[in-house]
Amino acid sequence: MYTTADSSNLRLSATDTLEFKDKGQPFENEVTVFVDPSKTFQTFFGIGAALTDASAETFYKLPKDKQQELLKAYFDTETGIGYTVARTNMNSCDFSSDMYTYVQDGDKDLKTFNIEHDKKFKIPFIKESMAAAGGTLHLYVSPWSPPAWMKDNNDMLHGGKLKPGFTVAGQITLLCL
């Protein structure tokens, strides 16, 4: 059993060993977990971090030694938590210091596609996180919102729906860092 508790020295610390045992009919006031090893429902894929603009910008405000301490604490499989999964955003999100998209307004053909904004903090942070994780970090990348000009309310932050002609059917392009 592992415990993490605020205002203590327990940070993902092994605090006890538990084992499953056969038990007869439980009383109604007992918390009971029934385990049938012949049935499986899902696979545990991993645990991880949100590598957003805010986390990247904050990370680079830290002194170099503290940056390394943070990376080791979260991603190192020997002495840290050993995160294996991370997610990040395309375009800005509510964890960004400013609003931005990867294309200029009205560019339906994506000729102005540009990720310069992400090259300053987010991409280097992702790369350092991957290195700290031993070179392998499953990365999920998703848009928080389409650009405002693609939405019926012309707003990236307050809902809305895609305007006709902007739905994607059949093809998704994945950009590799």
Image (cartoon, rainbow, N blue to C red):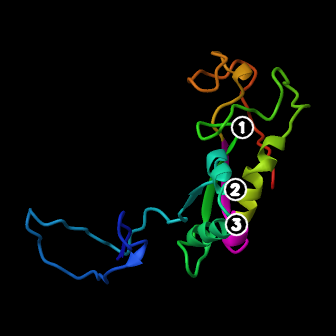
Q: Residue at coordinates 64% horizontally, 48% vertically from top-left?
A: 52
Q: Which residue is mark 1?
A: 91
The kind of secondary structure element at disc 2 is loop
Q: Residue at coordinates 61% horizontally, 22% vertically from top-left?
A: 161
> Quick one: label 3 or label 1, which is nearer the N terminus?
3
The quarter of the picture where residue 168 lies is top right
- Marks 3 and 2 sit apart, C-alpha to C-alpha, by 8 Å
Q: How many marks?
A: 3
Is 134 in the magenta?
yes
Q: Nearer the viewer, residue 168 or 159?
A: 159
Which x, y percent locates residue 61?
67, 54
Give the magenta part as a residue range.
Answer: 129-142
Q: Residue furthest front?
A: 63
Q: Nearer the viewer, residue 136 or 99?
A: 99
Q: Residue at coordinates 55% horizontally, 80% vertically from top-left?
A: 79
Q: Are marks 1 and 2 in contact (CB under 8 Å)?
A: no
- Report the amino acid beneath label 2: Tyr
Above or below 49: residue 101: above
The kind of secondary structure element at disc 1 is loop
Q: Are marks 3 and 1 in contact (CB under 8 Å)?
A: no
The kind of secondary structure element at disc 3 is helix
Which x, y percent locates residue 175?
81, 49
Q: Which callout, 3 or 1, points to the residue nearer the camera?
A: 3
